[in-house]
């Protein structure tokens, strides 16, 4: 009796607990933050196994409010998703079995469709976790449930089975192949269920999900190819039932498995076109249909280029979307710009056009779109003219090559629209000019500077339409950013006058009306002009600086944050342009203003636009002030480190969670397959990247002055080598490493070694794991620099082993990629655009090869011959670069790998001579200029460093080198670098191995070939040797009675004119001394100078003044 009473009381206690749990679930949904937070803490404290019991009980209890039950279902799914391994395996087997049966029973008993879906999601999640690493499923009952349900007469059960399979298409584990025909039959049957549209929709989604889950399985894709017509049929039907879920699945297939669509590409494209052009559908559905075509133009561009008829029908649809604009009376005077409405048809159409042009190339797109745009620009309705100009802006990048030929007529035509009666068309014309200035940079500025600057300045006078004024200023920024200084200088007076007048007027408007949009852009235009004009901006400094300082001092209201930030940027760019001497008069005021903002920095909100402007401005101030900036570091570094340390919010979400999230809240999502997505909140990422870049700047500029901060910066930067959310952050982390070592040197070898040990492992691992080739090249370059700083002994045997394995992997990957490119050249869709893409891939590959070469070079320069045994494990792969079956021409990279061996490991290098000597001599006369250049460079290295063993080969090389130098066209643009390397190599042989050559016979020829001016490195060698010869009074060089001196003057003057000799080069001083010696003899001086042209004379004067 007693035990019976006990069980009754314990049951009562359990019931009470369950009631409390229902209340807790209610509180978890409370709109009151504090109640919800309290409930979350209570929920977290409940043990895992109890949670499962309570949640299952809540799900099963039909008497509880549905929203509470749904909450329980969501929580149980999340629990299984995130903490399965901690909770489930620890449960006794009968408890595990009870959970499995409970879930399957609940699906069958549940009457609410929404609730049933959520329980199916739990079943899918549990099944996902009950498949082991070998694909064995520990829950056979769920498979039986699927088979029974899908063939059941009960529609509800069929839906449930399809929902589970859609959610987890890998549910069959290693039995999938065995059941493949059954799966296919099941999907086909359901897609043909004429009585139940929901079954058709679910089966099409499940089929798409299965295809996506098996994207690498080519035989399976082929086996399931005949399901595609059924899927397309359902896409069409479901769209008209206001359900775009199957259409979204089609977009995913186009993105991830485009080859699945290949057998039915035409019907896929036709359907997408039909839906896209049907205005009875929602904007979102039409845009999704367009997305299928656009995505395929990126992922299957070669296939799509064969269907020009479809492309020709898709482009007008995009243009039609771009015309879908609202008449907005307040548009011209809006002072706060809203971000683009990415859901609007106009923005979607423009983006689609841009992507399609880039995907398919201008050869296809431009001929199709040209006529449409011309017609739109002549349409009396402003919306068509606006769309036509925006379309021109959108296609510039993709149609670059084809538009370049007709740019003159395009620009002349677009400039007319800056006079259009409608302000929004004038705005679009500014947009097109600004975009073309970027897309066709340099060529655009050189050809159209006069027309464009005048037209934009005139448009900036449009006082009644601030939006147009601001956009004209924005276009001017694009133009000046890429404009060569020499082109801009003649316009400076006029430009500055206009900008100043507008700035003064807009400052008045700000004070009177509070409007700021145009002022924000004009301040940036001034900054951009100063940045390009550099010291030529000096005369205008006093015109702008007082007003700019006034803005920073007084624009303190929240709505003026962006203006203030841009003004801070402008002041620092002007300071950098005019230089320290002029800026010093205001430097102290500016620093005080910055410091004041900095002190308020902690009060700034995280999204305050001033933060990134401030951070960049500090770095510019550092460049201007140099060592004097050190005193400000204590104030600057705190907020900078805080920004550089921002940790982004991330989340792992499944499809259900994803539906409740919104990209507008600053979240971006990447699909990980298997119904899971990775989300990251992007706010603060750009600021973090800027801050990291500024830390690099401080380390570079201040060197040992930055030593106090090296420890905290290195602790921040090393983990950021794995910060995969932003490439710029990883690049900055890599760049900082060698610079931080340089800063730390001043603390002595022990501190330096400790720092190196902290970063070395991470750097080597990053070389092995970095996925992006641009970032990888930076990491490899930085590692090579670190080795040069640290020198011999900086790597232990484990490092050598790991690095050797990684570099071996990079070389093997190079050959594998080469083979893959050859396979793609055999593909049925191969065409010249595919070849362009393959060439780009090849360039990427080759760039990584040069970085492998950098690392080897640093290893040889630090370790000398000690590193040879390690190098020999890479040698077979390096030799493969020159093998006969290697068709893509990597011979010159092969040479560069081996020249480091000659330079740093001679005389031991001679034992590898069989690998490079004969090929190198043969390659001096190769058809490829790159190969000739590499071979000639190698001969120079051999003469300079190789030693006695190489004598005979130096002698053999001379006639070969002379042959290249004296060949017709040897000074042509494509040949000049190879020729100059040959000239330099002849000089090095005469200088370092004079016994191998008749110096007196060759010297007059060598002199006649000078100057070397394109290849900077070789120019320094040749000028240094020329100084040796002149300083030793070589009679052949000076000529009888110094008759060659006028010629020598010419050579030196050209070297300065073409900047072949820089201020920092040691030979510059020696060249100046040669000239000064001649100055002492008046007659000789006059004779030499009189033969020089104006540019050469001023170059000689510059040399005397600065060296």
Image: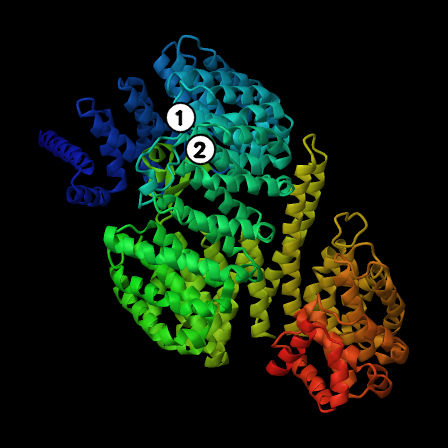
827 or 1045: which is nearer to us? 1045
Tag 2 and tag 1, C-beta contact below 8 Å: yes
* Residue 391 percent location from the top left of the image: 51, 35
* Residue 840 percent location from the top left of the image: 64, 46
User: Which residue carries the number 2 mark?
Assistant: 348
Q: Is residue 697 left or right of residue 793?
A: left
674 or 900: which is nearer to us? 900
Residue at image position (43%, 47%) is 459
Q: Is residue 1042 placed above or below 710 in the rendered structure? A: below
* Residue 233 percent location from the top left of the image: 49, 15
Marked residue nearer the N-terminal end (2 or 1) = 1
Q: Residues within 10 Å of mark 2 (few under 14, many from 20)?
A: many
Locate residue 237: give its quadrant.
Answer: top left
User: Which residue carries the number 1 mark?
Assistant: 283
* Disc on res. 753: none
Residue at image position (69%, 41%) is 821
* Residue 728 percent location from the top left of the image: 47, 55
In space, the residues marked 2 and 1 are separated at their CA atoms by 10 Å
Q: Residues within 10 Å of mark 1 (few under 14, many from 20)?
A: some
967 or 501: which is nearer to us? 501
Q: Is residue 637 placed above or below 252 in the rendered structure? A: below
Residue at image position (20%, 45%) is 41
Instruction: State the quadrant of the C terminus.
Output: bottom right
Q: Is residue 502 placed above or below 619 in the rendered structure? A: above
């Amino acid at each position: 009796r007693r035990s019976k009473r006990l069980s009754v009381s314990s049951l009562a206690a359990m019931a009470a607990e369950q009631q409390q749990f229902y209340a807790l679930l209610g509180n978890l949904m409370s709109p009151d933050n504090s109640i919800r937070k309290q409930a979350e803490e209570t929920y977290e404290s409940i043990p895992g196994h109890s949670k499962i019991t309570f949640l299952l009980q809540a799900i099963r209890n039909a008497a509880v409010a549905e929203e509470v039950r749904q909450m329980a279902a969501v929580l149980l799914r999340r629990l299984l998703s995130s903490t399965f391994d901690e909770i489930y395996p620890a449960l006794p087997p009968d408890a595990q079995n009870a959970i499995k049966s409970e879930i399957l029973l609940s699906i069958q008993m549940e009457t609410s469709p929404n609730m049933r879906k959520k329980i199916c999601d739990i079943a899918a999640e549990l099944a996902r976790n009950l498949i082991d690493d070998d694909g064995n499923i520990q829950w056979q009952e769920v498979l039986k449930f699927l088979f029974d349900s899908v063939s059941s007469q009960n529609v509800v059960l069929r839906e449930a089975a399809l929902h589970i399979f859609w959610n987890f298409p890998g549910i069959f584990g290693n039995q999938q192949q065995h059941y493949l025909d059954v799966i296919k039959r099941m999907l086909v049957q359901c897609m043909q269920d004429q009585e139940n549209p929901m079954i058709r929709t679910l089966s099409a989604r499940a089929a798409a999900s299965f295809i996506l889950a098996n994207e690498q399985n080519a035989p399976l894709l082929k086996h399931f190819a005949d399901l595609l017509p059924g899927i397309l049929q359902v896409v069409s039907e479901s769209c008209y039932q206001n359900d775009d879920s199957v259409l979204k699945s089609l977009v995913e297939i186009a993105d991830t498995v485009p080859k699945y669509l290949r057998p039915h590409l035409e019907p896929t494209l036709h359907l997408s076109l039909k839906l896209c052009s049907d205005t009875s559908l929602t904007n979102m559905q039409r845009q999704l249909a367009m997305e299928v075509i656009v995505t395929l133009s990126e992922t299957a561009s070669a296939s799509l280029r064969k269907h020009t008829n479809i492309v020709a029908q898709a482009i007008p649809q995009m243009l039609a979307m771009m015309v879908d604009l609202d008449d907005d009376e307040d548009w011209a005077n809006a002072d706060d710009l809203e971000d683009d409405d990415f859901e609007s048809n106009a923005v979607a159409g423009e983006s689609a056009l841009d992507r399609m042009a880039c995907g398919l190339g201008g050869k296809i797109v431009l001929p199709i779109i040209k006529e449409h745009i011309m017609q739109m620009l002549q349409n009396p309705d402003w919306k068509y003219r606006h769309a036509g100009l925006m379309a021109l802006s959108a296609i510039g990048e993709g149609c670059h090559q084809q538009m370049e030929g007709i740019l003159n007529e395009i620009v002349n035509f677009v400039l007319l629209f800056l006079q259009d009666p409608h302000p929004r068309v004038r705005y679009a014309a500014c947009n097109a000019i600004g975009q073309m200035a970027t897309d066709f940079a340099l060529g655009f500025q050189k050809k159209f500077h006069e027309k464009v600057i005048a037209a934009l300045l005139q448009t900036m006078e449009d006082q009644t339409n601030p939006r147009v004024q601001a956009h004209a200023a924005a276009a001017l920024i694009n133009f000046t950013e890429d404009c060569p200084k020499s082109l801009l200088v003649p316009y400076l007076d006029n430009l500055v006058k206009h900008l100043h007048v507008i700035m003064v007027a807009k400052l008045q408007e700000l004070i009177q009306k509070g409007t700021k949009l145009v002022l924000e852009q004009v301040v940036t235009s001034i900054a951009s002009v100063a940045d390009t004009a550099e010291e030529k901006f000096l005369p205008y400094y006093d015109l702008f600086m007082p007003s700019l300082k006034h803005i920073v001092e007084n624009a303190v209201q929240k709505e003026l944050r962006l203006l203030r930030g841009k003004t801070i940027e402008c002041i620092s760019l002007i300071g950098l342009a005019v230089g320290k001497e002029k800026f010093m008069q205001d430097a102290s005021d500016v620093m005080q203003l910055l410091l004041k903002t900095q002190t308020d920095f902690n009060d700034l909100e995280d999204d305050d636009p001033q933060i990134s402007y401030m951070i960049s401005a500090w770095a510019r101030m550092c460049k201007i002030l140099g060592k004097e900036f050190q005193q400000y570091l204590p104030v600057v570094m705190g907020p900078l480190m805080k920004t550089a340390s921002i940790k982004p919010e991330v989340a792992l979400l499944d499809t259900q969670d994803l539906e409740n999230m919104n990209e507008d809240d600053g979240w971006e999502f990447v699909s990980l397959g298997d119904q899971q997505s990775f989300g990251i909140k992007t706010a603060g990422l750009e600021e973090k990247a800027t801050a990291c870049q500024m830390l690099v700047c401080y380390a570079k500029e201040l060197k040992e002055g930055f030593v106090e901060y090296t420890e905290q910066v290195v602790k921040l930067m090393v983990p950021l080598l794995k910060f995969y959310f932003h490439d710029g952050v990883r690049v900055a982390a890599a760049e900082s490493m060698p610079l931080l070592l340089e800063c730390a040197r001043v603390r002595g070898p022990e501190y330096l070694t400790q720092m190196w040990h902290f970063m070395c492992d991470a750097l080597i691992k990053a070389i092995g794991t970095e996925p992006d080739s641009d970032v990888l090249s930076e990491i490899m370059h930085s590692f090579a620099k670190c080795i040069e700083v640290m020198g011999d002994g900086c790597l232990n045997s484990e490092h050598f082993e790991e690095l050797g394995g990684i570099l071996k992997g990079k070389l093997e990957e190079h050959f594998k990629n080469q083979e893959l490119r050859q396979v793609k050249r055999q593909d049925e869709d191969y065409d010249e655009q595919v070849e362009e893409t393959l060439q780009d891939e090849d360039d990427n590959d080759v760039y990584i090869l040069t970085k492998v070469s950098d690392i080897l070079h640093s290893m040889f320069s630090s370790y000398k011959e000690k590193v040879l045994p390690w190098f020999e494990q890479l040698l077979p792969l390096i030799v493969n670069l020159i093998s006969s079956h290697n068709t893509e021409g990597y011979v010159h990279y092969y040479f560069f790998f081996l020249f480091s061996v000659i330079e740093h490991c001679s005389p031991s290098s001679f034992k590898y001579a069989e690998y490079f000597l004969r090929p190198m001599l043969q390659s001096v006369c190769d058809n490829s200029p790159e190969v000739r250049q590499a071979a000639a460079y190698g001969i120079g290295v051999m003469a300079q460093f190789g030693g006695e063993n190489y004598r005979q080969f130096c002698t053999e090389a001379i006639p070969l080198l002379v042959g290249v130098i004296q060949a017709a066209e040897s000074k042509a643009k494509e040949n000049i670098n190879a020729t100059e390397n040959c000239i330099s190599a002849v000089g090095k042989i005469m200088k370092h191995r004079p016994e191998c050559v008749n110096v007196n016979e060759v010297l007059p020829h060598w002199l006649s070939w000078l100057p070397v001016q394109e290849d900077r490195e070789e120019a320094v060698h040749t000028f240094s040797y020329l100084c040796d010869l002149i300083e030793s009074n070589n009679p052949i060089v000076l000529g009888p009675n110094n008759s060659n001196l006028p010629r020598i003057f010419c050579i030196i003057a050209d070297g300065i004119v073409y900047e072949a000799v820089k201020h920092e080069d040691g030979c510059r001083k020696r060249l100046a001394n040669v000239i000064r010696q001649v100055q002492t003899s008046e007659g000789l001086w006059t004779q030499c100078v009189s033969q020089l042209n104006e540019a050469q004379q001023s170059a000689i004067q510059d040399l005397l003044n600065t060296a």
